[in-house]
Every structure is written in structure tokens, then in C-alpha cells.
Image (cartoon, rainbow, N blue to C red):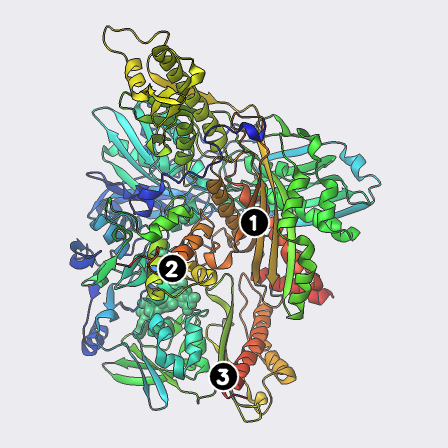
Amino acid sequence: MKAANFAYHAPTTRQELFALLAELDDARMIAGGQSLVPMMNFRLAAPENLVDLNTVGGLDGIEVAGDRLVIGAMTRQRAAERSATVARVCPLLVETLGRVGVQQIRNRGTVGGSIAHFDPTAELPVAAVALDAEVVLESLRGARRMPVADFGSDYLTTEIEPDEVLTAVEVPLWPEGHGAAFDEVTRRGDSYAIVSVAALVLLDAAGRVARLSVAIGGLTHAPARLAVDAMVGAAPEGEALAALAETARALPADGDGLMAAEDKQHLAATLTERVVRRAGERARRSTGG
Amino acid sequence: MADTIEISLTVNGQPRTGVAEPRRNLADFLRHTLGLTGTHVGCEHGVCGACTVLVDGASVRSCLMLAVQARGRSVETVEGLAADGAPLHPLQAALSEHHGLQCGYCTPGVLMTLLELQRELSGRPVDEAEVRHALAGNLCRCTGYQGMVDAALAVLNAPAGGATPETR
Amino acid sequence: MTLAERPAGVGISVPRLEDDALVRGKGRFLDDITLPGLLHAAFLRSPEAHGHIRSIDVAEAEALPGVHRVLRYEDLRPLLTMDRIPVAMPSGALKFDVDPFVLARDEVCHVGEPIALILAESRHVAEDAAELIMVDIDPLPAVVDPRDGLAPDAPQARLDCPDNLVARTSAAYGDIDAAFADAPVRFAERFHLHKGGGNSIEPRGVVARWDPMEERLTVWNSTQMPHRAKRLLVTTLGLTERQVRVVPPDVGGGFGPKFVFHPEELAIAAAAKLTGLPVKWAEDRYESFIATVQERDQFWSMEVAADADGRLRGLRGTLVHDHGAYTPYGVALPYNSATNLLGPYVLPAYALDISLCLTNKVPTTPTRGAGRPQGTFIMERILDLIAERLGLARDEVRRRNLIAAERLPFRTGLKTRDGGEMTYDSGDYAECQRRALAAADWNGFPERRAAARREGRFLGIGLANYVEGTGRGPFESASVTIGPSGEVVVTTGACGQGQGTVTMLAQLTGAALGIAPAKVRVIAGDTDASPLGLGAFASRQAVTAGSAVHLAAGKVRDKILAVASDWLEVAAEDLELIDGRVSLRGAPEVGRSIADIAAALSGSPGFSLPKGAEPGLSAAADFQPDAITYCNGTHVAEAEVDPFTGVVRLTRYVVVHDCGRLINPRMVDGQIIGGVVHGIGSALYEWMRYDATGQPLTCTYSDYLLATADVVPRVEVHHMESPTPLNPLGVKGAGESGTIAAPAVVASAVEDALRPLGVAIRDLPMTPDRLVRLARQARAAA
Ligand SMILES: Cc1cc2nc3c(=O)[nH]c(=O)nc-3n(C[C@H](O)[C@H](O)[C@H](O)COP(=O)(O)OP(=O)(O)OC[C@H]3O[C@@H](n4cnc5c(N)ncnc54)[C@H](O)[C@@H]3O)c2cc1C
Ligand code: FES
Ligand code: FES
């Protein structure tokens, strides 16, 4: 299990990075390496050129810009998980990141890498979709933005072009007082999710749903958004919530060797009910209702 | 054959230099280029935790980091916990005392994980669930974990000025 | 033997001598070994589950810079005395021995079978070269499911075997027809059991060096069985015993697979001999998933006959065992399952028909527990089923069936696999269960369950009893030698992979000789130091090597006392051994150092030895157990199961264990807790899966899940000590026993938690996927 040879490139500026990607054939970027290096050790990936994002200045960092949280792609998952800023403005990300692998992986794995890799069982893309997050894709040709919800095109494949770098993830902020929750079913502890659900909710003064967003991961190649309009105006519990869970059950799902599609849909329904309820309780608590 | 690269870094406080292909991971570099075989390799895909070392104080899988990526950084390995002939670090002593190791293959990784935890807690008491959670990334096939959990609890919750050591 | 007559050195948790080096990172494991000029090896392995090799072209690979040689079967065959490696264990039941080749000759029979061996300046380059080897393989149909493999129209798993039924055997006694005739309770059940691989965190590995001057081969081998490895190397390489030395370095866990001699062990040794250069092969994790023996699948179909009060009358049925592509371990694995099924219970009649099917997968051989967890699972599930049918409590059904203490020694009616009568030697099974139930507050459980239900949580409790045959022979050897320097050296064929074997033997020796264990040097498993030996298997080393060392150290002690008694002119009974001296009890100044006695016994030219003494302060002993000694225990576990997600959380785990006398209680606890957690892994997580063409699907630790610290409960261990009369220490084995009841007790608890849904647990492992499906099916049926 030793990686095949490659030429190693360590650009230090964005311009150098973009130029390398434009010019090199068969180049792969390495961020945290926590998904890529295992594949290289198994020789499932054997790029001729490895371009290290770790040496490029300014690709990490967490800041609030207006009504958006901007997380640099190279921000370590652990750094985002522990960031006071993230905790304050986007608790959903903290909870979600806490479920990504183990701390030794998050110490090195990056926020951008997790989204770029787009593993169908990964947690972060699910939260990102629930948050309506966008990725910023940059190259010599310029920059473009794309909703994470549109980013995945097939299993482990995204809309990114070979010369593009995912430089940041931008998260529109929910108002103070919103509630959020994330949960997943795993085969053991904090290993990859079979199905995971992220939800954000804002309640009105009467404790009814003013705004709700739910994303579900693990059913197909990309997280699915749940249609939630029917919940607006209802309390996030009881029959309305049960009906929402049924909507989750009706989402398309791919079965696999371990679990039938209908059982994944069952998990989606179960988790949706639990996660939305929990998000609602948190919203109620934070608004003091 | 790909070009080799000169890699200078600090290991356990000492400056070290070695030459390696860029594909050589930090675990192999420590073990076979620098001869520090205390760091073990059990899976080479990031799950077993036997290769866990600290890089700039953070626990990482040395099998998933390229040696070139450690240029200029500070790496800590199990060999740095206690000098040859010197008394054991309290975590090492406690692992033995609580029978937290059997074959010892996972032990170096376990120690580095616990060292990071100890520093992060910096004296805050810790419960069993938190210790178990912290150890979730270190596979051990021998002990059933209980001895290492007990060892960690004993050291991490020792009264200040008691058995809790100054971490180095 | 009574507990009062506890032999010296027994019952003390001496700190482990192994630990200091290990916690400092100064252990010396296989891959830590370097030698000048060392070549690094990688294997090209079969990508096909079954196929015929048409050609292997190594030219391009050999031309790669840094590659020393690429070897195929025909390159190594001239060094060997025979075509195949004679690894088969004697077994009358096997219709044919299917021994492996050093490298595949013309047929590959599982994914991962070694085809070519690359020697290069680094492992990286060796793997580069492997990609350049052109192998042309004609795929052949593969046998994946053993039940299909036994069908009349099944493809052949091996073209060199006429059919796939490599063995058919049985375990039977009593009048089974009578037991079933007019039995008030009769039912049938099927079970599909999986048990995973050994998964020592250190994979296998070999370093071999041929010394052309001495014509001698030295092999460092991460093995449980150095002496057996040596014997096979001597035989296959046509060398003499003097020419081969096998040494286990520090071994990072064994758990069964390192018992088995794999083709790589010969290939690396042969390559070193052929090239004259030292060669290292350190197995990587992918190789260990595809090329290291595993335990895998069993399909049981059972019929039960019982009395109206829940007493067993008879069990009969069939067991189909997935045997894999070779037969390195005879029928021992399924036979252990069959015999261990009996447990501590009275079973008047038994008839199990066992079929071993060749499949196109890695061979199956024992991993920790060695087939016993499966047998125990079947029996314990059956007892739970009887309880449910009759409306009896699960503990009561067991109580009615347990063998009463006064009936021990108890002949079960079966034969052990070495042909002896399977006889339980000592124990009190009912008392063991009683203590376990008390420790786990079994009677208080209904309240805990009700409280949990009020919070919407589903709790269940389970129990399981088991026995384990330990301390298998034929023998283990040891010697104890004290030289004029005073150093005490113990040599033995036994060897450790983490169990604390060195500490255990030093402890026994030190106690006999009045020397601190830390001052005893134990050389375990080096074939140069101990000409004879077996090694680590069947939870045997405390029993066999412990007894051998105890006997040898006792003889040395007698020698010391005899000489000292003569020198000091006092009776031997009045002497004591303390801190390396033998002296008059109560008058320590009257005495001599043991080193002096060793010096005297080592002789001076022309001077006579002390009166009546044999030369040398040394003694050897072999311990040959007359029979297997049976340890036993009861496990009780509580589980919280989420009926909607299938996630199981174990909330309590109690073990009461009886392995006779405890030599080092803390190390015994460590063995049991480690075993329990391994067993929890088998129950809930570990699953080596293959697709329909025989391609393995779970070759990473993200797919093949081992139990981690965060998902296992604290295990509470209590001991009973029923010394066995079968060895001088009164000890029984403990290395595997923790694994044996874990799947059964977890199943019992999970089923109990899901009782409101009517979910029945018949299969292992109990993954969330399976439990969610079972819950769905139960809902549909309701
Ligand atoms: C033991 C273990 C357990 C894990 N458990 C989980 C888990 O439970 N949940 C989970 O979600 N993940 C898990 N992971 C994966 C981990 O979160 C990875 O960190 C993540 O998937 C990828 O991030 P990275 O920074 O490590 O990226 P890398 O591994 O460096 O890269 C992954 C891929 O993304 C590309 N890429 C990376 N960054 C960029 C960028 N900025 N722009 C364009 N392309 C880029 C790379 O070229 C590569 O193809 C686990 C990993 C391990 C080893
Ligand atoms: S060897 Fe690095 S995690 Fe297993
Ligand atoms: S002590 Fe052997 S793997 Fe942990």
C-alpha cells in the first residue's frame, strides 16, 4: 500500500496555483489528504502531478462578511468546529463537524476538501445544502459561485473543472434565534453516515415554523433537499412533523448491498422527525419561548 | 524514479533532516528514513491510529501526511515522551499500571492521542465518555480499551500538583 | 487440589515486564528490523477469485530500476523438495488435503493468492513493479456461497479437487430418534453466523536471511508458531534442523491467523536463500484482508426436542461451513463449533452433520474463540427460544439444564478432536450463573426496563453460559538455567503476542527460586534456544508452558537446596530462597548465593562437583496435559436498541469467569475484557463480505469495522476459581474465553429489547442494516 510516484508541486500563491492547474496534465490537488492519500496508498488514485494546497497562502480562515459566513477552503475541519465565530453564527456546522470522522482526521482534513470530495455519506455537504451554502470556484479564468445543492453531478463527481480550485465555502447566515440540528445513523460510533439529516428552523412568536430547511444525505449521490412548505405555519411536532417525515420517506433512494432503498427511506423519515423536532426545541429555547 | 527532496523538520525538539521521494509518507519517513520505529503502521489508510503523531501539537495520521508536508514543522512521536533511561511520562506509566497495553502495537498512537487530550484539557477534569470518544480513533485488538481508559482517567483527573505532569 | 494449596507465584498481579520497552516505543516488531543490503518484497496477487493462469510476463517489471528480481513458481520450485507446502493438520475427516503452493502454479483459487514475488530496493518500487507484471488469467466460475457450492450442479472451486465437499463429518451421541419421538416441545430454526478475521493491528511479516558461510537460514517471523514454521521450512527447503532458526520478534497481536503457516513465509525464506540477500516482507492491511486466513460463514439448520419443563432432550441438524480454498487447519474450526455447542448443559442426545465446502475465498481457520462462539450462540439462542415458547424465564430454563456441580467430572458423550473423551474437569456452573445474575442485578432489570420505556427507550437484557476447552497438548517445553553470573534464563517454545507470556513465566520461575520476576530472562519461541516447542493456540500457554516452567523451576530449586543443604550441613526443609540466596530460615547470614551454587555446578577443571550433584544448575521439563481442561463462565449484558435506526448501545456487561487458578489476575482480566470486546465486534460490527463473483468488498477499516473505545461498555469481571486437577498449577486457559459468549449474550439482549416488535435474532452480525430490515419485516408481519 505505497503510493505511486508523482511530481510534487508546492505553489505559494493563488496565481501560481491557478497557473499550475491550467498547465499540468493529470494534476490532483491535495488538501488535508484524508480522503486522497488513502486512495493513493491503495493506488486507486495515481495522479502524475500532486499540487499541494497547504503551501498556498490565504486559503484558510473564517470570517463573517455581511450576512455570510465565509470559510476558506483550507480551514481545517477541527478549526472550524472549534471556532467561536462559527459557534456563534452557525451552530449547525459545529454539530455537523463534530460527527466527521475522529479528531485526528479533522485536525488535518479541510472544509473545502470534504465538499470537493463530495462523498455521498459525508456529513458536511448535507449541512451545506441545508444552509444553502455556495462554493467559490476559482481559476485563471476567473471566479464563479455555485450552490452546494447543485455541485454534485454523480457519485464522487462534482461540477468542478480540472483547472478550478474550490477556494471558499460561503454560508448565508440564519437570524439569531434559529434552531439547528444534525443527526446521522452510522454502522459504528462516528464512522461514515448511512443516512444523515441537517435541519434549521426559525419559529414565529407563537412557536410556529416561519422558515425551515432540511437536507438529507446518504440516499443518492448528493444530499436531497426536503420540500418543507407544508410545515410553514405549523408547530415543528405532532402530525405536521409526521407528515414531513413521510415526505422524507418518499424521496428517491438507491439501495446497496447492505441496505435496501426502502430502509434508507425509513431512516430518512425517522431522522427527519427527530432532527426537526430537536431543531425546533432549540429554536424555542433560544428565543426563550 | 521521481526526484528526492531534502526534508528538514523538528522531531521531538531535535532538528532532523532526511532525503525522500515526495510519495514517502511521514510514518515511513520517521520509521525508515530517521529510524524512529516507535511510530507504528497498521492500516495505511487512516483508521487504525497506530501511526498517530503530533504535528505542531495536533494529532494526525502520519500515514496520511506526506513527509514533504512536514518540512519546517515540529513533529512529536512516542520516543519524545521519555528520554532513554529517564522515568516514564505519567501517561506511559499509567498505561502499564492499568494494563492498558498488551502487544503494545497500538500503544504509541494511543499515547500521542492522550497527550493531545491532556494538553487540550489543561487540567479540566474529564469523564469516561469523553476519554472513550477521544480514543475512538485508535484501534486496539488486545485490550478491549478498558485499561487505557482507566489509565487516562487516572492521569487526567489526578489532583493538580499530584501525578499530573507538566506536559513537555 | 484445594485453593489453600496455591503454588508459589500464583495469584499475584506482577507488573508486566514487557511494558517498559513497549510504552517507550522501543519494542522491536518485524518491520522495525533492518539488515544491510535488505531487499523489500511485495507480492503480485490474484485479482480473480478463480482462474487459470495462462502466462506471467515479468520482463518489464524486472527492467524497472531498483528491482532486483521477480520470482514466479517455477523460479522457486527448484529450491523446494515438493510442489506444495505440507501445512495440513492430521485429520481423518478431510477427503483430500489441499495444500497451497509457494506461489500459484497454474490455478488461482481466491482473490489475493500470491502469484509472483517482487524483490526491490524499497517496498514502493516493488509495488511499482507489481503493476508492470503482465498476467493473463482465464477466469473460471467461482464458488462463493458454500450452500451453493454443495449443490449437484455447482462449479468446482478447485480443478484439482473432484468436488467441493472437502469433508463431511459429524458430532453425535445418544439416541437422537428416541429424543425426538413424542417430545412435547419440537421446533426448527436456521442461523447464519459470521465471524471475522483476526485483525491483529500489526499485520503478518517475515524477514529472512541466508548465511552462505554457515549455510544457515534465519527467519524473523511475526508468528504464533515459530517451531512449526521451522519444521515446515526444514521440510520444504530440504535443510536440516541445525540450518534453520525461526525467531518471533515482538509480535503485535496474533488472534489465530498467525498460527497458520502461509505461503509468504516460505516464499520469503526461499527468496533469501536463492538471492543470498536478506529479504523483508511486511504485510500491508489490504493484503491482510485478502490473503490472511479468516473465520467467516457458517449456516446452521437445527431441530430442537425438549420436555414440557424446558429440559433439553436432543438437538439435531446440519452445519455447512465455508472452508475457503485450502485446508491448512483440517476440520478443527467447525468441529469446535459443534462440540462447544454443548456448553455447560445436559444434552441427552445430539446429532450434527457437518459439511465443509471449498470456496474461492481465503481459507478459514480459527480466530480468537476458534469456532466456539458460533456453537455457544446456537445453544444459547435455542435456550432462549425454549424459554419463549414455554413462557419461562431465560435464567430458569438454563438453571434446569445446567450440569450440576456434583456431576463433575462430566463426560459429555462427544470426543475431542484429538480423540479423547470430552470431559468437563471442574467447575460449578449453576453457582457461576447465580453470581453473574446477582452482579448484574438481573432481578432488578424489569424496573430499569420500565423506566427506560417511559422515556421511549428500549432496553433488553441477556445472558449466556459457556465452557471452553483449553490447554491443548500435545506438550510444551521449557528449561530453566542459572549460570555462574546468577542470571536466570528461561527458554520455552511458547511465545507471546501480547498476552504477557514472558511476565507469566518469569513470575512462576521467580517465585520458585526466590528471585524477582524482573531478574528472570525469558526467551520465548526462539527455535535456537528451545529445540522443541509448539506455541500459542487454544488458550494453552499458561496451562502448558506455565506448567512446564513450574516443573523445571521446581527441579532447579531442588538442586539448589540439595547442594546448599550439603554445604551448610542443614536439612533442605530448613532452607529458604530469597533474593538470589539460599539461607537458613531465620538466619539469613547462614547461606550462599545461588550464583555460587551455579558456579560450583558448572565445574572447574579437575575438581569434583558437589556431592551427588548433576552438572549444571539447569533443568528442563516438558508438560504433556493428559486431557483438555474446561474453563467456563456466564456473561450478562444489557443493551439499548433504537428500534427505528437499528443502533445498539451496550449499557452494561458482566462476566463471571472460572479459569481455575489465576496466575496473574490483572493479566487474566485483560485477556477476558479484550476477548469480550472482540466478541462484541463479532456480534455487532465485523463482517467480511464478498460479491457474487468472489471479490472481497470490505478491505478497509472503514468498511470492515472493529469495535472502538466509544462503542463498547465497561466490562465488569468477577472470578471463581475451580482449580483443575489436570496440571500442577490448577490453571485453565483464558486467552479466548471472553469472545465465546459475547455474540450470544448480545443477541439475547438485543432480541429482548426488541421483543415488543417481535424481532427474532438468528444471524450475525447484528448491524443496523439488518436490524432495520428485521424491524420492517416484523412490522409487516404484525
Ligand atoms: C479514518 C477516516 C475517517 C473519516 N471519516 C469521515 C466521516 O465520518 N465523514 C466524512 O465526511 N469524512 C470522513 N473522512 C474524510 C475526511 O473528512 C476528509 O478530510 C475529507 O473527505 C476530504 O478533505 P481533505 O481536506 O482531507 O481532502 P483531500 O483528501 O486532500 O482531497 C479530497 C479530494 O478533494 C479534492 N480537493 C480537496 N480540496 C480541494 C479544493 N480546495 N479544491 C478542489 N479540489 C479539492 C482533492 O483533489 C481530492 O480529490 C474520514 C477520513 C478518514 C481517513
Ligand atoms: S497506519 Fe495510519 S491510521 Fe493506520
Ligand atoms: S495492545 Fe495490542 S493492539 Fe492494542
Q: Are marks 1 and 3 on the same chain?
A: no
Q: Position of residue B160 (x, y in %)?
A: 35, 61
In this view, the residue in front, B117 or A111, is B117
Disc 3 element? strand
Q: Residue at x 19, y 78 (%)?
A: A15
Q: Amino acid at mark 2?
A: Pro
The label shown at residue A179 is 3
- Structural distance between the alpha carbons of marks 3 and 2: 39 Å
Indicate the position of residue C162 as horizontal and vertical percent values: 55, 35
The residue sitting at the right extreme is C182
Residue matched to label 2: B159
Ligand 1 quadrant?
Answer: bottom left
Position of residue C91 relative to residue C497, above or below, is above
Q: Chain of mark 2?
A: B
The crowd level at tag 2 (other Cα within 10 Å; few <14, some 14-19, many 20+) is few
Q: Can you identify the residue that label 1 sits on?
A: C194
Q: Residues within 10 Å of mark 1 (few under 14, many from 20)?
A: many
Query: Which mark is in front, 2 or 1?
Result: 2
Q: Disc 2 versus disc 1: distance between alpha carbons?
A: 46 Å
Q: Nearer the viewer, residue B45 or C382?
A: C382
User: Residue at (57%, 58%) from the top-left corner?
Assistant: C651
The chain carrying label 1 is C
Q: Quadrant of the N terminus of chain C?
A: top right
Q: Is residue C362 visible?
A: no
Residue at left offset 44%, top offset 80%: A129
Same subunit: marks 3 and 2: no
